[in-house]
Amino acid sequence: MKNIAVIGSGTMGNGIAHVFAQNGYKVALIDISEEALKRALATIGKNLDRQIKKEKITEDDKAATLANITTFTTVKEGVTAADLVVEAATENPEVKFKIFKELDEVCKPECILASNTSSISITKIAAQTKRPEQVIGMHFMNPVPVMKLVEIIRGYKTTDEVTKIIMETSKSLGKVPVEVNDYPGFVANRILMPMINEAIITLNEGIAGVEEIDTVMKLGMAHPMGPLQLADFIGLDVCLSIMEVLYEGLGNDKYAPSPLLINMVSAGNLGVKSGEGFYNWTHGTKELIVSDYFKK
């Protein structure tokens, strides 16, 4: 496993490219937008500068990491040499299905295909290919360069050999891989997202305000970040997509997304990425938003 291709250069994609490149892998970072690729490289550079400032790496390490990354605007060109492809596109089943159909056609036969999906069935993704035994989930946590966990999700036909390779590859990145089975939300989001959704319901019912809810969970439950701030950080659109997967896949009303969450996403209030969610992030710092939604 020497050559890695990463599909998507957004927050997760550039983080995944960063950790692979920093650990000596040759990385092809692929996105349809040249501008998005430029922003991704700039982000990786800034994150490497933070590591330099903390004396975790040197300037030479930064240069070597960036030299390991090559950008491409077409999948076919970017995956030619790939031993492993990690897809980190938007959390939309149809988008992922289309990507995996193309990957199956253009990647070399022995290439392993992985998805960074946080909730979509690996078995369904694998079914879009003629190599389902070589399809697996690698769910990295955000921010990727910092967080240690990687959820390794086996599809119905994923082989033991492929699972072992991906577990060992994750360890080579300094990560802690945990193998889980293919059910909606896997483990991380099966537990996390209903908690975030319940926090939004609690807010919408006027039981407490944004800061009060987050403070209770931080100081009472030792969470490093409150659920509403975390939702802003993840992206409310992503939270909604995952809740919809849970609701559809598990068929239980307790997984129904909060109407407030649905309305906020419809209004374009997506959290940090849009500058406004439960907090105002426009100036790069967190400020509480007081709106009619939160007044009871």
Image: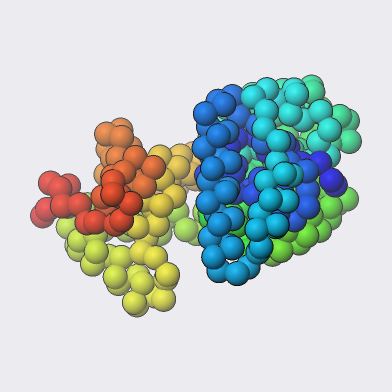
Q: Position of residue 78 (x, y in %)?
A: 74, 29
Residue sitting at x 70%, y 41%: 69
- From the viewer's perspective, tell me whether residue 1 is left or right of residue 68: right
Q: Quadrant of residue 108?
A: top right
Viewer-proximal residue, 199 or 218?
Answer: 218
| Residue extending furthest toward the front | 59
Colour scheme in use: rainbow
Viewer-proximal residue, 243 or 165?
Answer: 165
Residue sitting at x 31%, y 43%: 275
Q: Quadrant of residue 57?
A: bottom right
Q: Position of residue 53 (x, y in %)?
A: 54, 65
Q: Position of residue 219 (x, y in %)?
A: 34, 77
Residue 123, can we see it?
no
Q: Quadrant of residue 89?
A: top right
The quarter in which the C terminus is drawn is bottom left
How many callouts does the rendering have?
A: 0
Residue sitting at x 55%, y 69%: 54
Residue 38 vertical placement versus 47 (above, below): above
Q: Position of residue 26 (x, y in %)?
A: 78, 43
Residue 182 vertical placement versus 99 (above, below): below
- From the viewer's perspective, tell me whether residue 73 is left or right of residue 230: right
Residue sitting at x 30%, y 72%: 216
Residue 164, can we see it?
yes
Viewer-proximal residue, 39 or 208?
Answer: 39
